Image: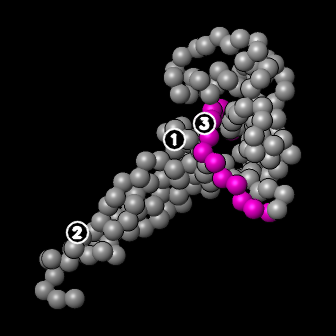
Amino acid sequence: MHTYSIEEQERVERIIRQCALCYVGLIDKNRRPYVLPMNFGYKDEIIYLHSGPEGKAAALMAEGPEVCLTFCTDSKLIWQHQEVACSYRMRAESVLVYGHVVPEEDFDEKVKALDIIMQQYSGKTFTYSDPAVKNVKIWKVALEEVSAKEFGVPSRNALKYKDRDRF
C-alpha cells in the first residue's frame, strides 16, 4: 500500500468539502495540545468555524494562536490479501492546514460566514435573528500552509500471495 501527496488545489478543496467535520488543534497556556471536532464552512481558501461565546475552545481561539486543522474523508478498510495481517490498511484522503485563527466581530461578515457554513451542510439559505448572530463566535482561518495525502493506495505491482508457489 502506498501514500501519495496531493498537490492539485481542486482536489484539496474537494477533500475539504467532502468532510463533515474538521479537527482543530490548539495549544493551551501549559503547552498542552487541545484538539476538538468542529463544524466548518469553506470558501475562497478560508475555513470558517463557529462556537458559543464561552468555553475552552473560544478562550484559546480568542488569543489568536496558530492553529492546525485536519480533514479526513471517510476511511475504508482494504487489504492486499485477507490472510496476511500486515497487508491491511485504511484507505482515505486527508488535508492538513496551518494558519492563524482570527475572530470575526462584524455583524454582516458573521452572517456571511454563517451562510457559508449552512450552505455547505444543508444547501439552504437561512435568516438569522440578531441575538443569534450577536451571540455566536465566528473564527476565520486562512490557509497558510497546506498538505494533502491519499493513503492506502494498492500498489500496481502488489503481490498476489496465493498465486505464488513459494515466498
Quadrant hosting residue 165? bottom left
x and y, in percent, of residue 73 in the image: 47, 47
* Badge 2 or badge 3: first in the primary sequence: 3
Predominant SS of the magenta segment: strand
Q: Amino acid at mark 3?
A: Asn
Whole-angstrom CA distance, mark 2 to mark 1, is: 29 Å
Q: Residue at x 53, y 58 (%)?
A: 149
Above or below, 24 against 123 in this view is below
Q: Residue furthest bottom?
A: 166
x and y, in percent, of residue 108 in the image: 79, 17
Q: Which disc number belongs to residue 82?
A: 2
Whole-angstrom CA distance, mark 2 to mark 3, is: 36 Å
In the image: residue 44, left or right of residue 166: right
The N terminus, quarter of image: bottom left
Tell me if residue 101 can be seen: no
Kindly indicate whether the residue at mark 3 contacts the one at mark 2 (C-beta within 8 angstroms). Answer: no
x and y, in percent, of residue 162 in the image: 15, 77
Q: Residue at x 47, y 65 (%)?
A: 3
Q: Amino acid at mark 2?
A: Gln
Comparing 86 with 28, the one in front is 28
* Badge 3 or badge 1: first in the primary sequence: 1
Q: Residue at x 49, y 62 (%)?
A: 4
Q: For numbered disc 2, what is the local secondary structure? A: loop
Q: Residue at x 57, y 55 (%)?
A: 148
Above or below, 160 against 149 in this view is below
Circle 1 is placed at which residue position?
19
Above or below, 61 against 51 in this view is below
In the image: residue 154, left or right of residue 43: left
Circle 3 is placed at which residue position?
39
Whole-angstrom CA distance, mark 3 to mark 1, is: 9 Å
